Amino acid sequence: MAIIASNFKTNHTRKSTASFINEVATFVEENNINNEIFIFPPSTALDSFEISSNIKIGAQNAYATQKGSFTGEIGTSQLDEFGIKTILIGHSERRHVLNESQSEIAKKYSFYKDLGYIIVYCIGEPLEVKQSGLEKTLEYIYEQFEGIDTNYENLILAYEPVWAIGTGVTATNDDIKNVHSAIKEKIDKPLLYGGSVKVNNVNEICSIEGVDGALIGTASWIADDFKQIIENTKDL
């Protein structure tokens, strides 16, 4: 059954997030949806929500700490207030825009692994690497597993080619299948695809061999669209 995740990034307010989650939760309950669903709001919108057990609210980021003097960051004391036990780690925007190093990412991963969090761990290559061929792409991706315990029981992987995120350019089915198949040969964990996934292509993408669901950005920010994405993948 497809895993469907929405990453709000720096979008939605506390009020609009609550409205979105309540609307999606009602849809899931009324339609007996059994997909595992993740929603990653901005940290200012984290809260406690009345949702079914197959919907999980996660943090887009947090520092490897309970609390302390880390200006602009949040730690587990802020997440614990709302029972948040899911986190996104390694997203390309944190790697390439905010310059998080692999060692910083691995430290964060180990910290939240030791606390039993569900970790959605993101990997992916920039365009210049993709253009060098599959072998170079896989070399680049495998480097992103340095310091990462891939045997962790609560690990979900998300392959997001950087060149396809928010660009409207989607990898071909063969691109997705080739990379997913290679990763799953090495690591037997659920593997999501992300990168310009939309309402009208999510079923096709999630039907590709080796694709266990989707991590979606822009196309998931409107509740009606996210509900349709869930509807389009509920039988996979």
Image (cartoon, helix red, strand yellow):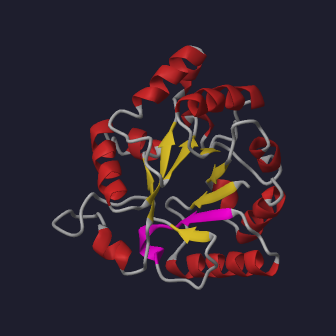
Image position of 174 with respect to 68: above or below: above
- The residue sitting at 70% across, 75% down in the picture is 24
Image position of 84 with respect to 211: above or below: below
Q: x%, y% of residue 115?
A: 33, 62
On screen, residue 123 versus residue 211, left or right, reads left
- The image quadrant that residue 11 belongs to is bottom right
> Can residue 39 be found in the magenta stretch?
yes
Image position of 151 with respect to 74: above or below: above
* Number of numbered labels in the structure image: 0
> Can residue 25 be found in the magenta stretch?
no
Which region is colored magenta? Answer: 36-46
Judging depth in this view, the residue of 144 and 13 nearest the camera is 144
- The residue sitting at 79% across, 43% down in the picture is 207
Q: Residue furthest left?
A: 69
Q: x%, y% of residue 14?
A: 50, 79
The answer to whether residue 128 shows anywhere in this view is no
Q: x%, y% of residue 37?
A: 64, 64
On screen, residue 11 versus residue 199, left or right, reads left
Image position of 160 with respect to 54: above or below: above
The N terminus lies in quadrant: bottom right
Q: x%, y% of residue 202?
A: 77, 49
- The image quadrant that residue 70 belongs to is bottom left
On screen, residue 212 versus residue 32, left or right, reads left
The answer to whether residue 121 shows anywhere in this view is yes
- The residue sitting at 39% across, 58% down in the picture is 61
